[in-house]
Structures are given as structure tokens and as C-alpha cells.
Image (cartoon, rainbow, N blue to C red):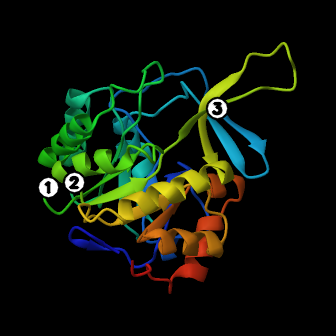
Amino acid sequence: MQLGQLTLRNPVCLAAASWQLDGTGYEQLGAIFTRTVTMEPQPGLYEEGIWQVNEQTLLNATHMRTESAEILVQEHLPNLRRYGVPVFVSITAPGIPGFRKIARFLARETAGLIAGVEVYIAQPDAGKGEELTAQFVRDATQAVRNELPPEAAVVVKLPPWPEHIRGLALGAQEGGADALAATNLLKALHLPEDATAAPMVGGLSGEALRPVALRCVWELAHDERITLPIFGTGGVFTASHVSDYLRCGASAVQIASGEWLEPGLSARLAAECGHLVPASL
């Protein structure tokens, strides 16, 4: 996969990588994407708010604690870089100035240490949907792109909205993105068996997300206006799932929930799928 000036040597990538990532085989990955960080730490309501709602589906809690970009650079980045594969820092912010600030910090503090940045575009939990527009995506992408050196790649991760994702992707493309990722979490709710317990509110990932994410990849890959390569992400557990994303038009995949449920899965699939190439559409 060609990503700006960078060539990924394997279509399998790890996303939301554990800060304590340990084991073998990760040196075969195409890239490692960090957990999403913010400029300042967000204490949140949960330290590790991830619930397994069925065998291969997770609910990632709203208001989960997030690390700061500074802690990432000082404490976690060296561990992730030791595998010798490109590392991308996933970032989010509540507005354009926030994206600019964190990108500027990373440009200053990680020169030559990271391959690029993933711009995580998410609708605020209290939002009604209309706040997230193609213009916002374009401006956020451009703010990050302008702060980073030209050799640093910018990947924009978009929400799982098949009916709107083409427009959002065009905004990212106009803002200077080098690639797209489809998708991030789908807002969901889980009811505990205890009828007196409060509902669990968060974002769906894993098996239940995969059909929606596949449709999003398909939408992006079949729009002749969109020329950027695509990461497919959502519910990748087997080599067949990797192949499905490539058949739909992705150039690579990201694995997050699968790795959380089965540590080492991404390394195993990288070994199995290194020979796969995207389908010709």
C-alpha cells in the first residue's frame, strides 16, 4: 500500500495498540496505529471501559479515559517503535484549534519517530449529527496536514455512515489526506442482564460492525472522485475477513477488537496475509 511517500509492506495493520504491546511477529505488520490520544489527558469515567457483548463484539464505553499526547511520546512510543514498523499516532480533538495544537506538538516532539498521524473524526456524544460535515472534516484534515512535515502521512478515520461517508471522504481528500480509514465506532447501547443496572452507552466494534464497515469501504472505493487508498477496519478476525475488505476496495486493514480479544492475532494474520493484494475494481 502506497501511503504518501511511505510504502506499507503488509496489508495487515494493528490499531488501538496496547501501550504494553509485547510478543513476537509484530515486526511483520504493515503499520502500528496507537490508541487515540488527546492533547490533554481526559480522565473519563472508565479506565478500561470495554465490555464484551457477545463472542466477537465489543462495546467501547463513552467517556473512557484517554492518554495525553505528551505521555504517549514520553512513555509509550518507544515500546511501539521497537518492532521496526511504521507507527501512526491516532489523535482526536473537539474542534479545529485542538487538532492544530496536537499536530503541532507531535511535529515538534516526534520528528523522525512516527510515520504519520491518524485523524480520528467522531461525532460528539451529545451531538445531533448535523455538526459533523464535510467542511469540518476538510478543515480538521488541513489543520493537521499544515502542521506536519511533508513526509508524514495523514490518515483520516471516518464514522460508519454509509449514506454520508463519500461526502466526508471528499472533505478529507480536499484537506490533504493521504489515506482514509473506514470506519471508527458505531454508537450503540447494551443492556446488562441486571434490570436495575444502568444501560452501557458507547461505540460498537468487532463482528457486529464489519458489515457496515464493508459497505463504507465499498462506497468509497466505487466513487470515482475519491482517489485515496483505504484502510478497512471493523471486525477483522480471519484471513477471509482481510480478503473481504480487499475485495471491497480496501488496500489494507486495521485490527483492533480482534487483538483485544486474542492478543497476537494481528501478527498471525500478517504472516498469513502478507501476499494478498487489493482487488481491481
Task: Please name the residue that numbered disc 1 is placed on.
Answer: 149
Residue 147, how many percent across, how many down? Answer: 14, 45
Instruction: Judge by depth and name the residue closer to the eye, 193 or 21.
Output: 193
The quarter in which the N terminus is drawn is: bottom left
Label disc, if present, on residue 49 of the rendered structure: 3
Instruction: Judge by depth and name the residue closer to the eye, 140 or 20.
Output: 140
Instruction: Judge by depth and name the residue closer to the eye, 279 or 233.
Output: 279
Local crowd size for mark 3, using a 10 Å CA cut-off: few (<14), some (14–19), many (≥20): some
Q: Nearer the viewer, mark 2 or mark 1?
A: 2
The quarter in which the C terminus is drawn is: bottom left
**Residue at disc 1, secondary structure:** loop
Disc 3 from disc 1: Cα separation: 35 Å
The mark that comes first in sequence, 2 or 1, is 1
Disc 2 from disc 3: Cα separation: 33 Å
Does 236 sit left or right of 111 as displayed? Answer: right
The residue sitting at 39% across, 46% down in the picture is 158
Residue 151, how many percent across, how many down? Answer: 17, 63
Local crowd size for mark 1, using a 10 Å CA cut-off: few (<14), some (14–19), many (≥20): few
Local crowd size for mark 2, using a 10 Å CA cut-off: few (<14), some (14–19), many (≥20): many
Residue 130, how many percent across, how many down? Answer: 35, 26
Q: Is residue 15 above or below residue 265?
A: above
**Residue at disc 2, secondary structure:** helix
Disc 2 from disc 1: Cα separation: 17 Å
The mark that comes first in sequence, 2 or 3, is 3
Task: Please name the residue that numbered disc 2 is placed on.
Answer: 173
The residue sitting at 38% across, 47% down in the picture is 165
Q: Is residue 160 above or below residue 155?
A: above
* Residue 24 visible to an observer of this rendering: no
Q: Amino acid at mark 3?
A: Gly
